[in-house]
Image (cartoon, rainbow, N blue to C red):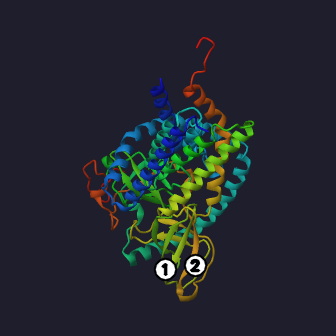
Amino acid sequence: MTNTKVIIALGLVLAAVLVQTTLFQYLRPFGYAPALGMLMVIALARYLEPEQVLLIAFTGGFLQDILGGAPLGLWASTFTLVAFVALKVRDRQIPGRPVVLLGVFALTFIGQFTYAVLGTLFGQGIINRPGFIGDLLVPPLYNVILAYPVFWLVKITVRPPERSWTA
Amino acid sequence: MFPSGRRLDRSTALFVTLLAVGFLVATFDVRSSSGSVTTVIRSGAQTLVAPIQQGIDFVVRPVAGFIDGISNVAGLSDQNERLEAEVQRLEQRLLETAALERRVAELEAINDLAPPEDLATVTARIYSVGPSTFDQIRLVNRGSDDGIVIGQAVVDEDGLIGRVDLVTKSSARVRLITDPLVSVGVRVQDSNQTGVTTGRGDELLRLDMFDATQPVSEGAVVLTDGSLFPPGIVVGFANETKSADVGFSLRTTVDSAVAFSQLDFVKIVVGWSPLDADPGASDPLVDAPSFTDPGAGPE
């Protein structure tokens, strides 16, 4: 059962990355797209074991690296970092949905910023770009908008079954 | 936070290990040349993923078009007015074109340049973009089976789009001229002065000229000079009038001729060999094709 969930979770992340590179070439409000792969990793961090989340995040990030134009490993490292931070905060008592959405924004922002720093260190010149601030802020906003459908999808596919009175 | 300290330690150790692996792979990828293991990984994965991406693209394209159409209905009136103004402007430019064409032909004769329309091209459709806004790339559905090799120029009816930098049998990756890693040797049409444009991540390009004896006028046409890209392709239009600073160096910006956000079909110029094109590096997994003879291309 656990293996099945891991495979489904991995499939979800890979699908998110593929949708990111296809659907969002057409749907780019104001020239920006959400960071769907990262959002999926954040959502999965709520339900899976820490090691599983980290490995899935790294694999999803690596696929994103392969489909992108920057050196391999940058998105993999970024997704892993986002997953780790998400794991650190997931069991805290979170008072209300707005805070969850704020968490999604903050985690995506951390991911975008981390990638920008890593990309610049590895010669991509990201921080010097004119639209850099927009690149940091707008995808996290879109992720907040998409958070509920993505969280719902993850909930119905990989959430552990709740114990019933017969269990 | 976690049920046991042991679990926390394990996940932290795994996190550090994965980060180290990521940095190691990135360093190796940056330092390796084309044809290395990382290129093989990219090409192999691209070969596997391309059909899936093209399938998703096939499904979402009409849906996205429909949504786009609905969202545009409100703006149709404004768009109509803008188009009318555009038609008037274009009619004005048509009057200027004849004179410009004569001048271009004259300049091309002087420089022994082939006009770009004489070059053999392969038409390709964009089916995927980079996974983030940081990536200035497009994936197209033509590959080495269609005569595509690394280094070939990619254009559309408006001008230069970019350069092929990864090829599989059935797909290719195009790095746009808006990428900060891409530089294009150019000349300004009205003064024939040369320079280099470099991407900035948006649709404005930075133009550097190191021996500018004349100013660059706003709207001046900037063309490829024929070093890495076929000569005479429109790159963009000077964004402002600017004179050289001390030492004849001039830096200004150029509006790219192509609307990169609206790209759909593109043409890959297969009938012209860039100086640094390396057919052997097209795809380590497949036999490299030779360049197509000019005029004998598929289109």
Decide: few, some or many residues near mark 1? Use Cα within 10 Å; few <14, some 14-19, many ≥20: some
Q: In which quarter of the image is the N terminus of chain B?
A: top right
Q: Which mark is residue B193?
A: 1
Q: Position of residue B122 (x, y in %)?
A: 38, 51
Asked if residue A99 can be seen in this view, the reply is yes
Report the residue marked by disc 2. Answer: B216
Q: Position of residue B153 (x, y in %)?
A: 41, 60
Lateral position of residue B289 relative to residue A158, left or right: left
Whether callout 2 and callout 1 share a subunit is answered yes
Q: Position of residue B152 (x, y in %)?
A: 37, 59
Q: What residue type is labelled 2?
A: Val
Between residues B109 and A157, which one lies in front from this camera angle?
A: A157
Asked if residue B178 can be seen in this view, the reply is no
Q: Where is residue A146 in the image (x, y as percent from the top left)?
A: 65, 38
* Contact? badges 2 and 1 (CB < 8 Å): yes
Secondary element at tag 2: loop
Between residues B207 and A52, which one lies in front from this camera angle?
A: A52
Lateral position of residue B71 relative to residue B165, left or right: right
